[in-house]
C-alpha cells in the first residue's frame, strides 16, 4: 500500500491486489459494501491520518479506480469537519463512493531510464507492445492488453514505476506520444 497527499484535503491510496488478498478482500467487495470493506476503509483512513498528518472527520468523497490486475487507487477528499453527533450511528465515517475501472494498463515512470530497464525485463519474458507517452516530465507506458500473465507483468511493471490513475483518454489527448505502438520492441532496438 502506498499513500500520497495530493492537496490539503485530498489523498491518494494505492492498494495492490496482494494487499486486498492478504486482508481477505476482493475488488468486488467494494460494490457490495461489506463490513470487511468498511473496516479496511476505516484502517486506511487511520493510517493515512497518522502518516500524512491529516485530520479526517465527517463526510468524505471516495473515488476508486480499479486497475485490473494491479489493484486499485482510491482518491479520498475530506469535505470538512463536522460535529461529533453528525457521525453515523455505527461509528463509521460517512462516505460517497464512485467506482471506475480501466481495461488498459497504464504505468507512470519518473524517468526514461526506468522505462528502458522495464523494456529489457519485459522482453526477457516475451512481453511486447505498448505505447510510450510523456506528460509533465514523466513517462507513461500504456498497454491495451498485457500478454500472457497479466498479474505477473503488472507486478514487474510496479517494480520500475507506479500504476497511474490518469485516464488513458486524458493521456492520449494531452500527453506527448513518443511511440505509438510496439514501444517495448522499439526501446530495445535503440537502447540495448
Image (cartoon, helix red, strand yellow):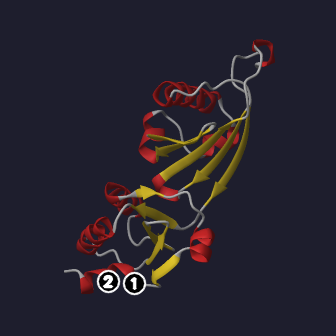
- Location of residue 87 (image quadrant): top right
Looking at the image, how many numbered discs can be counted on the residues?
2
161 to the left or right of 120: right
Residue tagged 1:
182
Helix, strand or loop for disc 2: helix
Within-10-Å neighbours for mark 2: few <14, some 14–19, many 20+: some
Question: Which of the pair 35/164 is nearer the observer?
Answer: 164
Within-10-Å neighbours for mark 1: few <14, some 14–19, many 20+: some
Q: CA distance from mark 1 to mark 2?
A: 5 Å
127 to the left or right of 22: left
Residue tagged 2:
185
Q: Please say if 44 is above or below 116.
A: above
Quadrant of the image containing the N terminus:
top left
42 to the left or right of 110: right
57 to the left or right of 161: right
Quadrant of the image containing the C terminus:
bottom left
Q: Position of residue 118 (x, y in %)?
A: 29, 67
Residue that lies at the very extreme toward the left in this rendered image: 192
Q: Position of residue 182 (x, y in %)?
A: 39, 84
- Location of residue 102 (image quadrant): bottom right
Helix, strand or loop for disc 1: loop
Question: Which of the pair 182/76 is nearer the observer?
Answer: 76
Q: Please say if 134 is above or below 153.
A: below
Q: Position of residue 139 (x, y in %)?
A: 42, 68
Question: Which of the pair 104/74 is nearer the observer?
Answer: 74
Q: Position of residue 130 (x, y in %)?
A: 43, 77
Q: Please say if 52 is above or below 116.
A: above
Task: Identify the residue shown where x is 47% and y is 75%.
Answer: 133
- Tell me, yes or no, whether the two marked residues, 1 and 2, touch with CB atoms within 8 Å: yes
- Residue 140's tag is none
Task: Identify the residue shown where x is 52% and y is 30%.
Answer: 48
Amino acid at each position: 500500500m502506498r499513500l500520497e497527499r495530493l492537496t490539503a484535503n485530498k489523498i491518494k491510496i494505492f492498494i495492490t491486489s496482494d494487499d486486498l488478498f492478504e486482508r481477505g478482500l476482493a475488488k468486488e467487495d467494494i460494490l457490495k459494501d461489506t463490513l470487511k470493506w468498511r473496516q479496511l476503509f476505516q484502517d486506511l483512513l487511520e493510517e493515512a491520518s497518522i502518516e500524512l498528518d491529516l485530520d479526517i472527520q465527517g463526510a468524505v468523497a471516495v473515488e476508486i479506480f480499479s486497475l485490473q490486475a494491479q489493484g486499485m487507487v482510491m482518491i479520498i477528499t475530506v469535505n470538512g469537519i463536522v460535529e461529533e453527533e453528525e457521525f453515523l450511528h455505527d461509528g463509521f465515517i460517512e462516505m460517497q463512493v464512485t467506482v471506475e475501472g480501466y481495461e488498459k494498463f497504464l504505468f507512470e515512470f519518473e524517468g526514461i531510464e526506468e522505462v528502458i530497464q522495464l523494456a529489457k525485463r519485459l522482453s526477457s519474458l516475451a512481453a511486447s507492445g505498448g505505447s510510450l507517452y510523456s506528460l509533465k516530465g514523466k513517462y507513461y507506458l500504456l498497454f491495451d492488453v498485457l500478454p500472457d500473465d497479466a498479474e505477473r507483468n503488472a507486478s514487474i511493471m510496479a517494480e520500475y514505476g507506479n500504476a497511474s490513475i490518469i485516464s488513458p483518454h486524458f493521456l492520449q489527448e494531452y500527453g506527448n506520444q513518443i511511440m505509438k505502438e510496439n514501444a517495448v520492441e522499439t526501446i530495445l532496438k535503440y537502447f540495448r
